[in-house]
Image: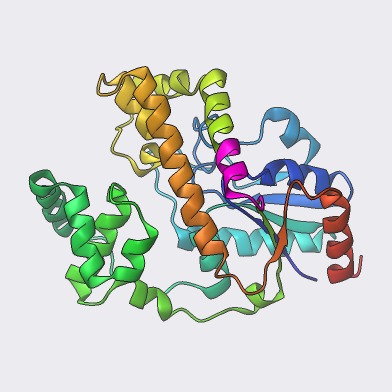
Amino acid sequence: MAAVYLLGPTAAGKSALALAIASRLACEIISVDSGQVYRGLDIGTAKPDAAARRAVVHHLLDIRNPDQPYSAGEFRRDALALIAAVEARGHVPLLVGGTFLYFRALERGLATLPAADIAARRAIEADAAQVGWPALHAELAQIDPLLAARIAPTDRQRISRGLEVFRLSGQALSTWHAQTVPSARGSSALRLILAPASRQTLYAAVDARFDAMLAAGLVDEVARLRQADYSGALPALRAIGYRQAWSYLAGELDYPTLVAAGKAASRQYAKRQLTWLRGDPHGHWLDPAGGSVTARVCDLIKRTRDL
Protein backbone atom coordinates (compact mmCIF):
# COMPACT_ATOMS: atom_id res chain seq x y z
CA MET A 1 0.00 0.00 0.00
CA ALA A 2 1.22 3.52 -0.77
CA ALA A 3 -0.09 7.00 -0.32
CA VAL A 4 -0.39 9.12 -3.45
CA TYR A 5 0.98 12.65 -3.52
CA LEU A 6 -0.36 15.09 -6.11
CA LEU A 7 1.91 18.12 -6.12
CA GLY A 8 2.23 21.08 -8.44
CA PRO A 9 2.44 24.84 -8.67
CA THR A 10 -0.55 27.04 -7.99
CA ALA A 11 -3.22 27.09 -10.73
CA ALA A 12 -1.90 23.90 -12.36
CA GLY A 13 -5.24 22.11 -11.90
CA LYS A 14 -4.43 19.78 -8.98
CA SER A 15 -7.90 19.93 -7.40
CA ALA A 16 -9.71 19.18 -10.66
CA LEU A 17 -7.40 16.24 -11.37
CA ALA A 18 -7.86 14.93 -7.83
CA LEU A 19 -11.64 14.95 -8.25
CA ALA A 20 -11.32 13.21 -11.61
CA ILE A 21 -9.13 10.52 -10.05
CA ALA A 22 -11.58 10.08 -7.19
CA SER A 23 -14.43 9.60 -9.67
CA ARG A 24 -12.64 6.45 -10.92
CA LEU A 25 -10.94 5.14 -7.79
CA ALA A 26 -12.01 4.91 -4.15
CA CYS A 27 -10.04 7.90 -2.83
CA GLU A 28 -10.17 10.24 0.11
CA ILE A 29 -8.45 13.57 -0.39
CA ILE A 30 -6.12 14.96 2.27
CA SER A 31 -5.43 18.65 1.74
CA VAL A 32 -1.78 19.71 1.82
CA ASP A 33 -2.48 23.43 1.81
CA SER A 34 -1.51 25.78 4.62
CA GLY A 35 -4.35 28.17 3.78
CA GLN A 36 -7.21 25.72 3.42
CA VAL A 37 -6.95 24.70 7.07
CA TYR A 38 -8.49 28.07 8.02
CA ARG A 39 -12.21 28.75 8.32
CA GLY A 40 -13.38 31.72 6.31
CA LEU A 41 -10.45 31.59 3.88
CA ASP A 42 -12.28 30.00 0.98
CA ILE A 43 -11.99 31.99 -2.23
CA GLY A 44 -8.37 33.05 -1.86
CA THR A 45 -7.23 29.51 -1.05
CA ALA A 46 -9.28 27.89 -3.85
CA LYS A 47 -10.83 25.65 -1.22
CA PRO A 48 -12.99 22.84 -2.64
CA ASP A 49 -16.63 23.92 -2.75
CA ALA A 50 -19.59 22.16 -1.15
CA ALA A 51 -20.32 20.07 -4.26
CA ALA A 52 -16.75 18.74 -4.40
CA ARG A 53 -16.82 17.93 -0.71
CA ARG A 54 -20.10 16.05 -1.10
CA ALA A 55 -18.69 14.06 -4.01
CA VAL A 56 -15.41 13.07 -2.31
CA VAL A 57 -14.37 12.94 1.34
CA HIS A 58 -11.89 15.76 2.06
CA HIS A 59 -9.71 16.07 5.16
CA LEU A 60 -7.82 18.95 6.83
CA LEU A 61 -10.16 21.68 5.63
CA ASP A 62 -11.60 24.28 8.05
CA ILE A 63 -9.86 22.94 11.14
CA ARG A 64 -8.59 26.27 12.51
CA ASN A 65 -9.77 29.85 12.88
CA PRO A 66 -7.48 32.40 11.20
CA ASP A 67 -5.91 33.36 14.53
CA GLN A 68 -5.16 29.75 15.51
CA PRO A 69 -1.72 28.64 14.25
CA TYR A 70 -1.23 25.32 12.48
CA SER A 71 2.31 24.06 12.12
CA ALA A 72 4.08 21.65 9.78
CA GLY A 73 4.57 19.36 12.77
CA GLU A 74 0.83 19.31 13.46
CA PHE A 75 0.18 18.59 9.80
CA ARG A 76 2.58 15.64 9.88
CA ARG A 77 0.87 14.20 12.94
CA ASP A 78 -2.61 14.62 11.46
CA ALA A 79 -1.67 13.41 7.98
CA LEU A 80 0.00 10.23 9.22
CA ALA A 81 -3.08 9.38 11.29
CA LEU A 82 -5.39 10.09 8.35
CA ILE A 83 -3.31 8.05 5.89
CA ALA A 84 -3.52 5.06 8.22
CA ALA A 85 -7.28 5.49 8.71
CA VAL A 86 -7.98 5.89 4.98
CA GLU A 87 -5.91 2.82 4.14
CA ALA A 88 -7.71 0.86 6.86
CA ARG A 89 -10.98 1.65 5.06
CA GLY A 90 -9.52 0.23 1.86
CA HIS A 91 -9.36 3.62 0.15
CA VAL A 92 -6.53 5.48 -1.53
CA PRO A 93 -5.10 8.37 0.53
CA LEU A 94 -4.66 11.12 -2.07
CA LEU A 95 -2.63 14.02 -0.66
CA VAL A 96 -3.18 17.13 -2.77
CA GLY A 97 -1.66 20.58 -2.50
CA GLY A 98 1.16 23.01 -3.01
CA THR A 99 2.50 23.55 0.51
CA PHE A 100 5.75 21.72 -0.01
CA LEU A 101 6.96 22.33 3.54
CA TYR A 102 4.11 20.06 4.66
CA PHE A 103 5.11 17.34 2.20
CA ARG A 104 8.70 17.59 3.40
CA ALA A 105 7.62 17.39 7.04
CA LEU A 106 5.58 14.29 6.25
CA GLU A 107 8.47 12.59 4.50
CA ARG A 108 11.41 13.59 6.65
CA GLY A 109 10.00 14.42 10.03
CA LEU A 110 11.05 17.61 11.74
CA ALA A 111 14.04 18.59 13.79
CA THR A 112 13.34 19.93 17.27
CA LEU A 113 13.71 23.62 16.46
CA PRO A 114 14.20 26.33 19.06
CA ALA A 115 10.85 27.35 20.54
CA ALA A 116 9.33 30.66 19.49
CA ASP A 117 10.73 33.53 21.50
CA ILE A 118 8.53 36.61 21.86
CA ALA A 119 11.39 38.91 22.79
CA ALA A 120 13.43 37.84 19.76
CA ARG A 121 10.47 38.35 17.44
CA ARG A 122 9.76 41.78 18.81
CA ALA A 123 13.39 42.75 18.30
CA ILE A 124 13.22 41.56 14.68
CA GLU A 125 9.98 43.48 14.10
CA ALA A 126 11.61 46.59 15.55
CA ASP A 127 14.52 46.13 13.15
CA ALA A 128 12.08 45.75 10.26
CA ALA A 129 10.33 48.97 11.23
CA GLN A 130 13.68 50.73 10.99
CA VAL A 131 15.19 49.23 7.82
CA GLY A 132 12.36 47.28 6.14
CA TRP A 133 11.84 43.57 5.47
CA PRO A 134 13.90 43.50 2.24
CA ALA A 135 16.93 44.62 4.28
CA LEU A 136 16.30 41.83 6.78
CA HIS A 137 15.95 39.41 3.87
CA ALA A 138 19.44 40.52 2.78
CA GLU A 139 20.69 39.86 6.30
CA LEU A 140 19.11 36.42 6.22
CA ALA A 141 20.84 35.73 2.89
CA GLN A 142 24.18 36.20 4.62
CA ILE A 143 23.50 33.67 7.37
CA ASP A 144 21.13 31.26 5.60
CA PRO A 145 21.42 31.61 1.80
CA LEU A 146 19.46 28.42 1.14
CA LEU A 147 16.43 29.69 3.06
CA ALA A 148 16.66 33.22 1.66
CA ALA A 149 16.70 31.89 -1.90
CA ARG A 150 13.35 30.17 -1.33
CA ILE A 151 11.41 33.12 0.11
CA ALA A 152 10.45 36.56 -1.11
CA PRO A 153 12.03 39.72 0.34
CA THR A 154 8.56 40.69 1.63
CA ASP A 155 7.76 37.37 3.33
CA ARG A 156 8.08 38.73 6.82
CA GLN A 157 6.83 35.60 8.58
CA ARG A 158 9.54 33.34 7.16
CA ILE A 159 12.24 36.00 7.28
CA SER A 160 11.43 36.59 10.94
CA ARG A 161 11.52 32.88 11.78
CA GLY A 162 14.82 32.38 9.94
CA LEU A 163 16.47 35.25 11.79
CA GLU A 164 14.90 34.21 15.09
CA VAL A 165 16.24 30.65 14.87
CA PHE A 166 19.72 31.88 14.00
CA ARG A 167 19.78 34.47 16.80
CA LEU A 168 18.59 31.92 19.35
CA SER A 169 20.75 28.97 18.29
CA GLY A 170 23.59 30.33 16.17
CA GLN A 171 22.57 27.81 13.50
CA ALA A 172 20.74 28.42 10.21
CA LEU A 173 17.17 27.16 9.87
CA SER A 174 18.17 25.21 6.73
CA THR A 175 20.83 23.47 8.78
CA TRP A 176 18.20 22.44 11.30
CA HIS A 177 15.99 21.12 8.48
CA ALA A 178 18.90 19.11 7.08
CA GLN A 179 19.03 17.21 10.36
CA THR A 180 15.68 15.56 9.66
CA VAL A 181 15.66 11.82 8.94
CA PRO A 182 13.67 10.39 5.99
CA SER A 183 10.76 8.23 7.03
CA ALA A 184 9.43 5.03 5.53
CA ARG A 185 6.19 6.85 4.68
CA GLY A 186 7.93 9.21 2.30
CA SER A 187 9.84 6.46 0.49
CA SER A 188 6.66 4.47 -0.25
CA ALA A 189 4.59 7.31 -1.68
CA LEU A 190 3.71 7.64 -5.36
CA ARG A 191 4.62 11.22 -6.31
CA LEU A 192 2.68 12.87 -9.14
CA ILE A 193 3.74 16.36 -10.25
CA LEU A 194 1.19 18.30 -12.32
CA ALA A 195 2.73 21.25 -14.16
CA PRO A 196 2.35 22.77 -17.64
CA ALA A 197 5.35 22.22 -19.89
CA SER A 198 5.31 25.93 -20.74
CA ARG A 199 5.95 28.45 -17.98
CA GLN A 200 4.00 31.07 -19.94
CA THR A 201 0.99 28.73 -19.98
CA LEU A 202 1.25 28.43 -16.22
CA TYR A 203 1.54 32.19 -15.75
CA ALA A 204 -1.54 32.75 -17.92
CA ALA A 205 -3.44 30.26 -15.76
CA VAL A 206 -2.20 32.04 -12.61
CA ASP A 207 -3.47 35.39 -13.90
CA ALA A 208 -6.81 33.92 -14.93
CA ARG A 209 -7.22 32.28 -11.56
CA PHE A 210 -6.57 35.54 -9.72
CA ASP A 211 -9.14 37.30 -11.91
CA ALA A 212 -11.63 34.51 -11.13
CA MET A 213 -11.01 34.86 -7.39
CA LEU A 214 -11.69 38.59 -7.56
CA ALA A 215 -14.85 37.97 -9.58
CA ALA A 216 -15.98 35.37 -7.02
CA GLY A 217 -15.73 37.92 -4.19
CA LEU A 218 -12.21 37.77 -2.73
CA VAL A 219 -12.35 41.39 -1.60
CA ASP A 220 -15.71 40.79 0.13
CA GLU A 221 -14.24 37.71 1.82
CA VAL A 222 -11.37 39.79 3.20
CA ALA A 223 -13.82 42.51 4.27
CA ARG A 224 -15.69 39.93 6.36
CA LEU A 225 -12.43 38.87 8.00
CA ARG A 226 -11.66 42.51 8.81
CA GLN A 227 -15.13 42.92 10.30
CA ALA A 228 -14.50 39.87 12.47
CA ASP A 229 -11.62 41.83 14.03
CA TYR A 230 -8.86 39.57 12.81
CA SER A 231 -5.48 41.25 12.50
CA GLY A 232 -4.00 41.72 9.05
CA ALA A 233 -0.65 40.74 10.56
CA LEU A 234 -1.79 37.13 11.12
CA PRO A 235 0.20 34.65 9.01
CA ALA A 236 -3.05 33.33 7.50
CA LEU A 237 -3.93 36.80 6.23
CA ARG A 238 -0.48 37.54 4.85
CA ALA A 239 -1.03 34.93 2.14
CA ILE A 240 -1.10 36.01 -1.50
CA GLY A 241 -4.38 37.63 -2.42
CA TYR A 242 -5.40 38.24 1.17
CA ARG A 243 -2.45 40.54 1.78
CA GLN A 244 -3.16 42.65 -1.29
CA ALA A 245 -6.92 42.79 -0.71
CA TRP A 246 -6.32 43.80 2.91
CA SER A 247 -4.08 46.67 1.79
CA TYR A 248 -6.72 47.72 -0.75
CA LEU A 249 -9.45 47.83 1.90
CA ALA A 250 -7.10 49.78 4.18
CA GLY A 251 -6.69 52.40 1.45
CA GLU A 252 -3.03 51.55 0.87
CA LEU A 253 -3.57 50.30 -2.71
CA ASP A 254 -5.95 51.25 -5.49
CA TYR A 255 -7.84 48.48 -7.29
CA PRO A 256 -5.59 48.24 -10.39
CA THR A 257 -2.55 47.96 -8.10
CA LEU A 258 -4.30 45.25 -6.08
CA VAL A 259 -4.82 43.26 -9.27
CA ALA A 260 -1.29 43.79 -10.57
CA ALA A 261 0.37 43.07 -7.21
CA GLY A 262 -1.69 39.95 -6.61
CA LYS A 263 -0.89 38.51 -10.01
CA ALA A 264 2.80 39.35 -9.74
CA ALA A 265 3.06 37.71 -6.30
CA SER A 266 1.19 34.65 -7.57
CA ARG A 267 3.52 34.26 -10.55
CA GLN A 268 6.57 34.61 -8.30
CA TYR A 269 5.15 31.97 -5.99
CA ALA A 270 4.54 29.61 -8.92
CA LYS A 271 8.12 30.15 -10.07
CA ARG A 272 9.48 29.24 -6.62
CA GLN A 273 7.27 26.16 -6.54
CA LEU A 274 8.61 24.99 -9.91
CA THR A 275 12.17 25.46 -8.68
CA TRP A 276 11.41 23.29 -5.65
CA LEU A 277 9.71 20.62 -7.74
CA ARG A 278 12.62 20.33 -10.15
CA GLY A 279 14.70 19.09 -7.23
CA ASP A 280 12.40 16.08 -6.79
CA PRO A 281 14.16 13.01 -8.22
CA HIS A 282 11.18 10.66 -7.76
CA GLY A 283 8.25 12.59 -9.21
CA HIS A 284 6.19 11.51 -12.22
CA TRP A 285 5.72 14.72 -14.23
CA LEU A 286 2.36 15.31 -15.89
CA ASP A 287 1.40 18.08 -18.30
CA PRO A 288 -2.29 18.98 -17.84
CA ALA A 289 -2.45 19.67 -21.59
CA GLY A 290 -1.02 16.26 -22.42
CA GLY A 291 -4.34 14.46 -22.88
CA SER A 292 -5.68 11.40 -21.03
CA VAL A 293 -3.98 12.54 -17.83
CA THR A 294 -6.67 11.09 -15.58
CA ALA A 295 -6.57 7.68 -17.26
CA ARG A 296 -2.77 7.54 -17.14
CA VAL A 297 -2.68 8.55 -13.48
CA CYS A 298 -5.34 6.05 -12.47
CA ASP A 299 -3.48 3.28 -14.28
CA LEU A 300 -0.25 4.27 -12.51
CA ILE A 301 -1.98 4.29 -9.11
CA LYS A 302 -3.53 0.88 -9.77
CA ARG A 303 -0.19 -0.63 -10.77
CA THR A 304 1.59 0.93 -7.78
CA ARG A 305 -1.02 -0.17 -5.27
CA ASP A 306 -2.02 -3.48 -6.93
CA LEU A 307 -5.66 -2.42 -7.05
In the rendered image, residue 169, in percent from the top left (x then y), is placed at: 21, 75
Q: In the image, is 266 to the left or to the right of 243?
A: right
Image quarter where the N terminus lies is bottom right
Q: Is residue 303 above or below residue 102?
A: below
Q: Position of residue 283 (x, y in %)?
A: 67, 67
Is 46 situated above or below 134?
A: above
Residue 300 covered by magenta stretch: no
Please give left or right for residue 27 compared with residue 50 in the image. right
Q: Main secondary structure of the magenta part?
A: helix
Q: Magenta part of the protein: which range?
A: 196-205
Is residue 113 in sight in this rendering?
no
Snapshot quadrant of residue 115: bottom left
Residue 198 or residue 25, whichever sits in front: 198
* Residue that sits furthest to the right in the current view: 307
As drawn, is 123 to the left or to the right of 201? Answer: left
Residue 174, relative to residue 92: is it above or below?
A: below
Indicate the position of residue 95 as horizontal and vertical percent values.
67, 56
Q: Position of residue 32 (x, y in %)?
A: 58, 52
Give me the residue at 11% from left, 55% from top.
123
Q: Residue at left 11%, top 44%?
A: 129
Residue at image point 27% right, 21% down: 250
Looking at the rendering, in which quadrant would you find the C terminus?
Answer: bottom right
Picture colour scheme: rainbow
Q: Quadrant of residue 191?
A: bottom right
